[in-house]
Each structure stands twice: as structure tokens, then as C-alpha cells.
């Protein structure tokens, strides 16, 4: 089954004609992922690698509904593109673009909740399901098989680049991936590690989860709370990068209100402490992930 | 994220009709006459640093006359306060206070809301007051899809115990803060203390504003107040940092190159992406190596960006080796990384026989990258080598040089 999509999904790419997006579309097709249509206003009627391009989602979905839209438009156009996708009842909207203004994201999140749309990103490199040969977005590049083998480990990564490297560690340990999700490096994202843990917990195809974390936000603390209060029943392995940031004047220093609201959340050392308390196996060095994955299955 | 200096934050408040004390930025000293023209004493001399908690950190001095004010200015300029050095001070008129409030509009990342936090007590102990529930707090989530209503602002005032004329002034002030928060797309607009005088007038005595760098291009009215590169806002960028910022901004939507100098160190360092760079930097240090900088490259940058970044990294004084590691890339064409890096090494005439270089990269076009590095005599490590293994190789190479 894996998570987020359970069958070969019908996929749209908004902004498909851009330089990056068209390269990624090529890589997706090469991997075996079908793209139903692309949407770029002003380019309707053209086609790209055999994929029809439309001006609007409405036209693209006239004959068949899309399951997923991948958003690859410039940062200030993301709000409009995601609204269009949600208005057209596309249940999963994945935002690859980075540098999306935060107040735009707050609005999109609110609307996504109203319409029961699953929003992933922004600043995500995508989602991959190796068993189904479905990759959404740049994840895995031109050859995902390098690092993503099919298997029973779920991956959640706050770092786009490290999604592949973590999955490669799983491969080195002799195992593979059920679904790997790059949740986006921003502080305000549509789907948090906790949301994905809930899904992985229910998923019969996932027997263990690896989480890659960074400083800032309260997502790990939230996940630790969730694991403690709900139990998880499968091994979770985590790595928290960026310990050195604690000793530097941080670029992500919050003002007073942040300190009040987040009560000192965000420090790698604190995240590690909370995760360990919840029973998560936290690797001290990145390479240790290999060993921890092996031990989870023995 | 850019935290504004207090004078700039107050300028934004003033433009939006929110009362603030009369003030003046001072870089060295003020002429004696200037005081009588500008101020009534006492005045408050505040160190200008992009941070809150100035009072707690002894960055604020009250002066009763020009002599005291001059002494305060001399004392504060150049002083290290927390992580920051104050290059100037903000002198403003003292506001006679009857009572203090706390008021904040902010983006709550974890709950994904725009929220208001207000308290009927303000001042420097606010965090402790709120956390210990010793003060009257109001928390309100704005509906991001609809306007904040006047009656909602009135309810907040009432909940804080504000009455009579003050209540009318309070809700009008709240509405103005709301407009500024939304219109400039701020991440934080905090007034602490929001003071009320014995005569019943409100004044934003302390102010913190955090702008969203990603929304800045929609706000030309903020240009000049904030720069969109604020990674290192705790100090002015060095010459090499300036060079990389310039190269990065030349082509702002094609990949990123970031470069931050670290004091001391002898290893030039480039990591791939945010997460990979953090992990590798930690890892190099844990193995006893001393990176001289922190750098990230990612998002499929053009060759020129990689070239400029590598040149900056290797140009810092005292560099004795170079380590570059990227996770398996998703969209970054690693052959382009290879071109940028090898061109920089050549242009700087680095003798690769006496200068340890370890490159580990994999991903899009990695065969071509391998060819480029190897034809230039540079040892290249691909996917067969894990990132931690590449770090170990660097450790060994540095040992061999000694």
C-alpha cells in the first residue's frame, strides 16, 4: 500500500514548461511515472515530451480527474497555483518551489484543511514509492534506483538532499523504501513528521521509519509527543543534523513571541532528548543509521 | 528572516499611525544644541542591535541631561550585547508610564496560523510572566481568509481589562497593527511594552518587527530598511561573503550558494543542501577537523555561482585543504558543480599535490562529473563512498600532509 497514494496516480505538473520542471518531467517518465498533463498559462495546446499542456487545470481535467498536482511555479505564483489545484478538488498538492511567503502558506493551509486536501511542502524535493515506480518531483534525480530500492522502510526528511542519502543508508543496510517523503525545509509546511508517522503507523507495507531532522521548528518535539501518547509499534530511527548551530548566533532566532510560544523548541540537543525519551533510536553519527536499520529488523 | 533595528521597526509603526516616542539614531555623538532642538529630558539611550531583550542585556541607559546622554552613547557604541556589537544607538524621549501592556502579532509556524498574543502586563519579564500564568493573557487566532473585525479587537481589549477612552484608543491601535502586519506580510510585529501614560495616551515604547524575506519583493516600500540577505545579520558581511552574496543574487532563482566565514579553521568547506551541509560540518568537527567556513550549494546552480563560491572558500587566509560533499542530488547537475570547482582551483593556481582535496558527490550526470574531476587530477568519490566515509578520507589526507 505505502502512504499518500495507493495506486498509480494521475499526475499534473503546474509550471511544467519551466527549465527545471521539464528536466524533472523527463526524469519522472524515465523512471516509469506517468504524467497525465501539464499546466502553464499561455502554453495551452503545446506538448512537452508527449505530455499535453493546458492553460488551466479545468481544461486539463475535463475528461479525467487528477489525483496529484505538483507545483513548480515561481514563489510568488505558488499561492494562485495551489488555489487552482484545490478549487479543482485535487486531493494531494505537492509544492516543490522554495521561498514561498509565509502568510501565503498560512492561507493555503487553512483552505487545504477546509477542503480536505493534503498539502506537502513547500520546498520539498518530492515523494517516491519505489515499488510502484512513482516519483513525484525531482526526488532521486535522473536515476532513483541508485538509492531508492523497494522495501519496508518509510523515510521522512526535512532536508531535500538528504532524503536520497538517508534512503541510500537504508539500501546499504540491505533494506528498501516503502515511501520516502521530503516534507520541505521551511518552518511552515503543509505536512509535518507527525502527520506522516500517523500514516506510516497504519501502513502494512512499512515496518520501520527513518526521520532526518534539522535545527529549528517544533516538529520533532511534536512527533515525540505523538509517539509517547499514541505509541507507534514500529522502530523509528532518527538523525538530527546541525548541533553546531546551537553555539552560533542563529539566523533563525525568534523574537520574544517565538520564545514564548515555542518555549525553547528547535535546539538539536533538545530534539534528540525528546525523541530518545519517546523511544526513538537516535543516531549520534550519520553513518550509524545503517547499523540501526539492520538492528531494527533483527 | 530579518529582524529590524528598533528605529526601523518604529518607523514602520509611525507610518501606520501607531504612536512611538520621538527618537534619533546616533552613530558617534550629538552636538549639545541638538539635544535642546530634538529632545526633552530625560532621554533613553538604546544600543541598536537586531534583537529583543536589550534591557535585560544592559543595552539601555536612561539619561537626565546631555552630559549623561553623551556618556551613555560612548558606553554603548562598540559594546558587545549578546551576540551583537552595537555600531550605533537610538536616543529617544522617555515616555512616562502608568501601565504597560504586551501586544504581538505573529506567524505561528507549528500551528500554521496568524495569531495575536496580548497581555495586561508588559516589560522585560514577559516570557516568565506568561509562562507562569501570572498575568492576564489573551490569545487569538486570526482567520487568514477574512479581515480582523473591530468587534474582535474590542473583545481583546475588554479581556485585558481596558476601559473607557483607553478601550477606544486600544482597539484602534490594534486595528492599525493588524493592517501593518498583513500589509507588509510580517512574521512578527511585537510591541513591548505598549505603555499608557498617566494622561491615558498609548505609546509603543519597545518594538520588534520581523519581515519575511521571501515576501520582500512585493514590498518596495520596505527597501532601504531591510536587505534580503540576512543570514549573517549579527555582523556585517566580510569581503569574501559580499562576493558570494553578489554572485548568488545575480541569478536569484537558479540555485543557491551561501558562504559564512567561521573564525579560524583551515579547511575550506562546501556542503550540498541545507541538511547535508549541517551534517557534514558537524561531522568534520567531530573528527577533529576545523572548517574555516560554513557553505551550502544547491538547487541546481549555474557554473558561475559554484565558481565564485569555491573561489571565496579557498581565498580565505590559512586554508590548507578543501572538502566538498553533497548528498546524492535530486536536480543539481553535478557535472556543473565539477566545472565550477575545477575552474576555481585552476584560476587560483592551487597545487593539488600539496593541498588535500576530497570531493564526494553523486546524482544527476555524475559520470560526467567524475570525468571532469579526474581529468583535472582531482580525487573524486562517488556513490560507493558514503558521506561519513568521505569525511574519514579527509581526516586521513590532512594527517598525511603533516
Image (cartoon, rainbow, N blue to C red):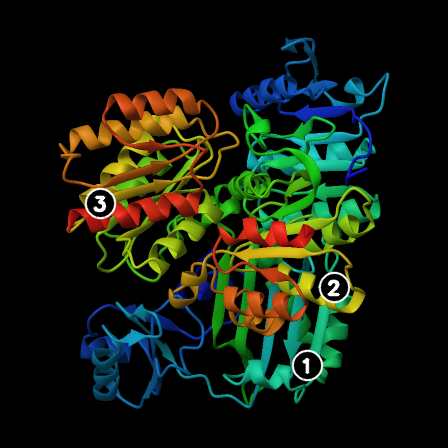
Circle 3 — which element?
strand
Between disc 2 and disc 1, the foreground one is: 2
Q: Name the residue under label 2.
A: A226
Q: Mark 1 points at which residue?
A: B165
Chain designation of label 1:
B
Residue at 83% x, 34% y is: A89
Between disc 2 and disc 3, the foreground one is: 3
Sequence-first disc among 3 and 1: 1
Residue at 47% x, 34% y is: B299
Q: How far apart are marks 2 and 1 (CA)?
A: 47 Å
Confirm whether circles 2 and 3 share one chain. no
Residue A3 to residue A37: above or below = below
Horizontal and vertical percent position of residue A290: 55, 48
Q: Quadrant of residue A187?
A: bottom right
Q: Can residue A192 be seen in this view?
A: no
Q: In which quarter of the image is residue B112?
A: bottom right
Q: Which quadrant of the rendered structure holds the N terminus of chain A?
A: top right
Residue A24 to residue B173: above or below = above
Q: Residues within 10 Å of mark 3 (few under 14, many from 20)?
A: many
Q: How crowded is mark 2: few (under 14 residues within 10 Å), some or many (20 or more)?
A: some
Q: Quadrant of residue A73?
A: top right
Residue A112 lies left or right of residue A180; in this view the side is: right
Q: Are discs 2 and 1 less than 8 Å apart at CB?
A: no
Circle 1 — which element?
helix
Between disc 3 and disc 1, the foreground one is: 3
Residue nearest the viewer, comparing A69 with B44? A69
Q: Mark 3 points at which residue?
A: B321
Amino acid at each position: 500500500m505505502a502512504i499518500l497514494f495507493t495506486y498509480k496516480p494521475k499526475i499534473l505538473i503546474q509550471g511544467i514548461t519551466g527549465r527545471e520542471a521539464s528536466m524533472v518531467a523527463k526524469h519522472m517518465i524515465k523512471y516509469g511515472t506517468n504524467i497525465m498533463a501539464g499546466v502553464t498559462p499561455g502554453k495551452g495546446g503545446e506538448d512537452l515530451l508527449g505530455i499535453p499542456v493546458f492553460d488551466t487545470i479545468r481544461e486539463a481535467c475535463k475528461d479525467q480527474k487528477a489525483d496529484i498536482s505538483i507545483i513548480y511555479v515561481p514563489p510568488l505564483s505558488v499561492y494562485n497555483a495551489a488555489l487552482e489545484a484545490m478549487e479543482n478538488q485535487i486531493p494531494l498538492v505537492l509544492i516543490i518551489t522554495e521561498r514561498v511567503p509565509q502568510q501565503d502558506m498560512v492561507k493555503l493551509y487553512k483552505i487545504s484543511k477546509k477542503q480536505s486536501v493534503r498539502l506537502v511542502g513547500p520546498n520539498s524535493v518530492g515523494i517516491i514509492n519505489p515499488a510502484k515506480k512513482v516519483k513525484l518531483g525531482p526526488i532521486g534525480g535522473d536515476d532513483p534506483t541508485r538509492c531508492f530500492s523497494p522495501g519496508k522502510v518509510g523515510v521522512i526528511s526535512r532536508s531535500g538532499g538528504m532524503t536520497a542519502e538517508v534512503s541510500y543508508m537504508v539500501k546499504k543496510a540491505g533494506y528498501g523504501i516503502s515511501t520516502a517523503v521530503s516534507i520541505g525545509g521551511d518552518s511552515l509546511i503543509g505536512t509535518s513528521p507527525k502527520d506522516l508517522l500517523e500514516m506510516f503507523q497504519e501502513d502494512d507495507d512499512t515496518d520501520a521509519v527513518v526521520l532526518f531532522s534539522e535545527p529549528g521548528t517544533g516538529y520533532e518535539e511534536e512527533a515525540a509527543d505523538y509517539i509517547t501518547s499514541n505509541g507507534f509499534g514500529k522502530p523509528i530511527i532518527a538523525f538530527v543534523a546541525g548541533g553546531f548551530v546551537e553555539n552560533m548566533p542563529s539566523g533563525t532566532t525568534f523574537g520574544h513571541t517565538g520564545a514564548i510560544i515555542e518555549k525553547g523548541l528547535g535546539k538539536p540537543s533538545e530534539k534528540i532528548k525528546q525523541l530518545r525519551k519517546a523511544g526513538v533510536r537516535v543516531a549520534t553519527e550519520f553513518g550509524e543509521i545503517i547499523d540501526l536499520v539492520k538492528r531494527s529488523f533483527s | 528572516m530579518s529582524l529590524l533595528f528598533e528605529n526601523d521597526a518604529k518607523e514602520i509603526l509611525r507610518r501606520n499611525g501607531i504612536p512611538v516616542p520621538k527618537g534619533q539614531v546616533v552613530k558617534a555623538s550629538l552636538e549639545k544644541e541638538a539635544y535642546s532642538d530634538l529632545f526633552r529630558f530625560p532621554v533613553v539611550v538604546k544600543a541598536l542591535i537586531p534583537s529583543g531583550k536589550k534591557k535585560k542585556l544592559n543595552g539601555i541607559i536612561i539619561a537626565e541631561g546631555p552630559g549623561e546622554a553623551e556618556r551613555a552613547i560612548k558606553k554603548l557604541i562598540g559594546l558587545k550585547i549578546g551576540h551583537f556589537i552595537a555600531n550605533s544607538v537610538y536616543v529617544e524621549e522617555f515616555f512616562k508610564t502608568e501601565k504597560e501592556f504586551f501586544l504581538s502579532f505573529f506567524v505561528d509556524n507549528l500551528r500554521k496560523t496568524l495569531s495575536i498574543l496580548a497581555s495586561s502586563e508588559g516589560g522585560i519579564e514577559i516570557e516568565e510572566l506568561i509562562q507562569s500564568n501570572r498575568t492576564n493573557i489573551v490569545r487569538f487566532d486570526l482567520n487568514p481568509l477574512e479581515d480582523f473585525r473591530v468587534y474582535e479587537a474590542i473583545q481583546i481589549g475588554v479581556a485585558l481589562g481596558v476601559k473607557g477612552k483607553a478601550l477606544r484608543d486600544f482597539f484602534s491601535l490594534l486595528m492599525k497593527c493588524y493592517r501593518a502586519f498583513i500589509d507588509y506580510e510580517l512574521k512578527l510585529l511585537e510591541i513591548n511594552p505598549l505603555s499608557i501614560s498617566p494622561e491615558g495616551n498609548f505609546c509603543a515604547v519597545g518594538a520588534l518587527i520581523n519581515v519575511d524575506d521571501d515576501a520582500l519583493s512585493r514590498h518596495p516600500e520596505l527597501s532601504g530598511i531591510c536587505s534580503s540577505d540576512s543570514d549573517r545579520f549579527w555582523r556585517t558581511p566580510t569581503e569574501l561573503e559580499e562576493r558570494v552574496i553578489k554572485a548568488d543574487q545575480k541569478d536569484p532563482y537558479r540555485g543557491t550558494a551561501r558562504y559564512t566565514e567561521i573564525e579560524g579553521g583551515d579547511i575550506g568547506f562546501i556542503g550540498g543542501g541545507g541538511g547535508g551541509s549541517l551534517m557534514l560540518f558537524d561531522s568534520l568537527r567531530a573528527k577533529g577537523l576545523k572548517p574555516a567556513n560554513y557553505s551550502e550549494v544547491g538547487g541546481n546552480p549555474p557554473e558561475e555561482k559554484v565558481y565564485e563560491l569555491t573561489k571565496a572558500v579557498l581565498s580565505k587566509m590559512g586554508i590548507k585543504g578543501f572538502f566538498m560533499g553533497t548528498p546524492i542530488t535530486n536536480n543539481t547537475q553535478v557535472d556543473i558543480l565539477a566545472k565550477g570547482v575545477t575552474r576555481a582551483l585552476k584560476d587560483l593556481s592551487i597545487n593539488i599535490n600539496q593541498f588535500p582535496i576530497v570531493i564526494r558527490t553523486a546524482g544527476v550526470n555524475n559520470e560526467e562529473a567524475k570525468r571532469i574531476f579526474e581529468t583535472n587530477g582531482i580525487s573524486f568519490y562517488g556513490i560507493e563512498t558514503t558521506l561519513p566515509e568521505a569525511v574519514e578520507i579527509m581526516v586521513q589526507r590532512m594527517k598525511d600532509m603533516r
